[in-house]
Image (cartoon, rainbow, N blue to C red):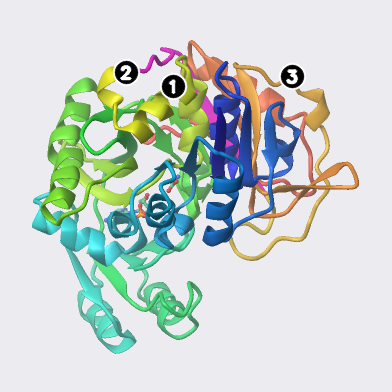
Amino acid sequence: MKILVIGSGGREHAIAWRLAQSPKCTQVIIAPGNAGTGLEDKIINVNITKVDELVAYAISNNIDFTIVGPELPLALGIVDEFRAHNLKIWGPDKFCAQLETSKAFAKEFMIKNNIPTAQYEIFDNLIDATSYIEKHMVSRLVIKADGIAAGKGVLVTDNKNEALDFLNDIFEQKIFGEQNSRVVIEECIDGIEASFIVMVDGNTIIPLPSSQDHKRLLNDNKGPNTGGMGAISPSPILNDQLSSEIMQRVISPVINGMKNQGHTYTGFLYAGIMVDKNQQIKVLEFNCRLGDPETQAILMRLESDFIELMEHGVHGTLNQITPIWSEKHALGVVLCHPDYPYKTSTPLLISGLNDINNDNTIKVFHAGTVMKDNHVYTNAGRVLCVVGLNEKTTDAKSLVYDTIHKLHFQDMQYRTDIPFDYRK
Ligand code: AMP
Ligand code: GLY
């Protein structure tokens, strides 16, 4: 079979790598991919990103089905476009994707469908948002840019000046783009976060193994929020009871709520959950795709044939399959450009990649990498994600950090405390 994967990050490298391991795979085409995907057996990169060109490519190359990695194509309505051309694609349509592409839509949807979440207010101008901060900033608050912002559109702070600067950045400086002109301001809730991701084919829901992200840039959970600096799977806090509660109180209400609005949710659905000290859950965010770097850890644990699983997804027959996952623990650490997450990065030469024997227990996934004159260079903020799999998290951790010590680029930045103990 020929599968098209859309995206260029570590998540997409992991998806393509797992698909390519299936005996059913003839070829995985990744658009646009990165240096790492271009080096894999049975995977080729094609440099296409526009939706109409991807449609044309899928038609003329007899692609069996397409998997969408990141949120941007979903926000642009790629699923609606592919389906209009009778092409099989995995992901939610543009309407359902608003759960991720608009924080305000997501909050209103949660209230309407009785899904537990933090108290909030929505503002569409600087004056009202500023006066809210002036009046209500007695303790920590969370400010969220409404639209997509690559994991960087959220500020958690108890500092009034920092809050006002962030509002100014959004409304005046437009750092997240012209169209990003609303904010959600919400109460700050305490607890431990977990990532809960499911596959939905319109009827059947299959939960993937739980995971935990590390959003802050620096050790000890300090520094700004990022797209994610490391992940472990399973999550240390989601037991069976909490998982079934999330299915009942969060995931099913999303699918049913969408149905009530005339839309069938298909694709991956990611709920970012906060679990407080009384084991109460609240939704922090929804994503309409797999997480990055959670996917790299989760897929390391997949023992079933990934193409077969995804085929059941796109054909609406998930009720006929039960995927098998390794009981082992996966741990991934992201290696970043020294400028991440603040600005566009200058290319840096990466060395050591050839000294690593990638296999099903240790794997270096590429994200922001590009091949130039037979050398691999950085070309974005998050560069590589090294994932290890072992019976114990501590052994997976040693495997990962031993591997990281063989890799080098100038001022390589990464956390040395994954997995962080959130209970301390
Ligand atoms: P989001 O993109 O909405 O998940 O926000 C990014 C990160 O900000 C989350 O993973 C949390 O670490 C933090 N965060 C978001 N909302 C809240 C909240 N209401 N209370 C505390 N932390 C939050
Ligand atoms: N790692 C969080 C996300 O993918 O949104």
Would you say residue 416 is visible in this rendering?
no
Horizontal side, residue 198 vs residue 9: left or right: left
Which residue is disc 3 drawn over? 357
340 to 406, vertically: above or below: below
Q: Position of residue 359 (x, y in %)?
A: 66, 17
Which residue lies at the image location 44% right of the left edge and 42% below the top edge?
291
Q: Which circle's residue, 3 or 2, is located before the other in the chain? A: 2
Asked if the residues shown at circle 1 and circle 2 are in contact, with their CB atoms under 8 angstroms apart, the answer is yes
Horizontal side, residue 271 vs residue 417: left or right: left
Quarter of the rendering containing residue 319: top left
Horizontal side, residue 386 vs residue 179: left or right: right
Q: Residues within 10 Å of mark 1 (few under 14, many from 20)?
A: some
Q: Secondary structure at mark 3?
A: loop
**Label 1 vs label 2: CA separation?**
9 Å
Q: Which circle's residue, 1 or 2, is located before the other in the chain? A: 1
Horizontal side, residue 88 vs residue 276: left or right: right
**Label 1 vs label 3: CA separation?**
27 Å
Amino acid of disc 2: Ile
Q: Is residue 391 magenta?
A: no
Amino acid of disc 1: Glu
Q: Is residue 330 magenta?
A: yes
Q: Position of residue 263 (x, y in %)?
A: 21, 52
Which residue is disc 2 drawn over? 321
In front: label 1 or label 3: 1
Which residue is disc 1 drawn over? 308
Range of the magenta residues? 321-336
In front: label 3 or label 2: 2
